Image (cartoon, rainbow, N blue to C red):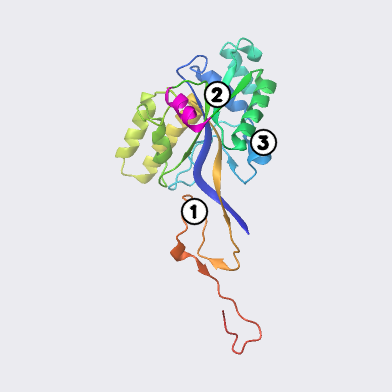
Amino acid sequence: DVHRFPYLGTYFLRFNTSRSPYSDSRVRKAISLVVDKERITTRITRAGEAPTGTLTPPGTGGYQPPPGLSRNVALGRQLLAEAGFPGGRGFPVIEYTYNIGTKLHEQIAIEIKETLARDLGLRFELKPMEWGPYLREMNALNYDVIRGSWVGDYEYPNTFLDLFTSHNGNNRTGWKSPEYDQLLARAAMVGDEGQRLALLRQAESLLVERDAPILCLFHYVGVFAFDAGKWGGIFPNLIDEHPISAIHRIPRAVAGEKGGGIR
């Protein structure tokens, strides 16, 4: 009776790019390349979430995101060494801020901590906070790495990609890219749908692959519990909308009744 479907939401981490050493994209990418997203979704979240290297869920408004960064420990170590921290030597302790209220955030944080220590030699200190202080620290850029998530307001890539334009109040990473801003502005002016989506894909590639001010972990799933043999009108959809007016009881034949009536 449990039904899962892709949902218009993404769980990710923000890097404070205004603070060294996270101002170096090689550091951000090294960490992103090492975190084991598959392990997080199969051992911790376990609801069928899709591990991802991209911000926008596939299929959003007919859009297919770029591949993103997949796990590559050797390349991660190489980039960290190029940034001046071979084997993690000399790298400051990473403070990871997250909001309390669900055990899930802590379990994910512990998994990342163990992975970074093992594969990059980095130390990772957990900094749990109540919701209010957590938001204030994020808005003030008073963090190293912080938990983030976003659920789209509508089914089109801009509901995710606009977040990280230079002057968007939801950016909260310190990252600013005139090139990224220009790609989104150009996409908004293009009348051809294919060209527009191609520009948005190029922008997302810059965001999650080249500069990596965020580390995307997984896309959410929607979960519904109902007997599909009894109820109809409930269909998987990214925005998780299920109008009550469309839901109906499925009639079934009553055995032994004259004329095979239904009820």
Relative to 236, 257 lies left or right: right
Circle 3 residues within 10 Å: few <14, some 14–19, many ≥20:
some
Q: Which portion, as a residue range, is magenta? A: 130-140
Q: Is residue 108 visible?
A: yes
Q: Nearer the viewer, mark 3 or mark 2?
A: 3
SS at mark 2 in the image? helix
Q: Which residue is mark 1?
A: 237
Q: Which residue is mark 3?
A: 39
Give me the C-alpha separation between circle 3 and circle 1. 26 Å
Q: Is residue 91 magenta?
A: no
Relative to 212, 168 lies left or right: left
Q: Between disc 3 and disc 1, whose residue precedes?
A: 3
Q: Nearer the viewer, mark 1 or mark 2?
A: 1
Q: Which kind of residue does numbered mark 1 sit on?
A: Asn
Quadrant where the image shows the N terminus: bottom right
Q: Which kind of residue does numbered mark 3 sit on?
A: Arg
Compared to residue 109, the image places residue 93 above or below, namely above
Circle 2 residues within 10 Å: few <14, some 14–19, many ≥20:
many
Residue drawn at x 56%, y 33% as measured from the top left: 100
User: Residue 202, position in %: x, y?
Assistant: 43, 33
Give me the C-alpha separation between circle 3 and circle 2. 19 Å
The quadrant in which residue 180 appears is: top left
Q: Which mark is residue 9?
A: none
Q: Which mark is residue 29?
A: 2
Give me the C-alpha separation between circle 1 and circle 2. 32 Å
Compared to residue 96, the image places residue 198 above or below, namely below
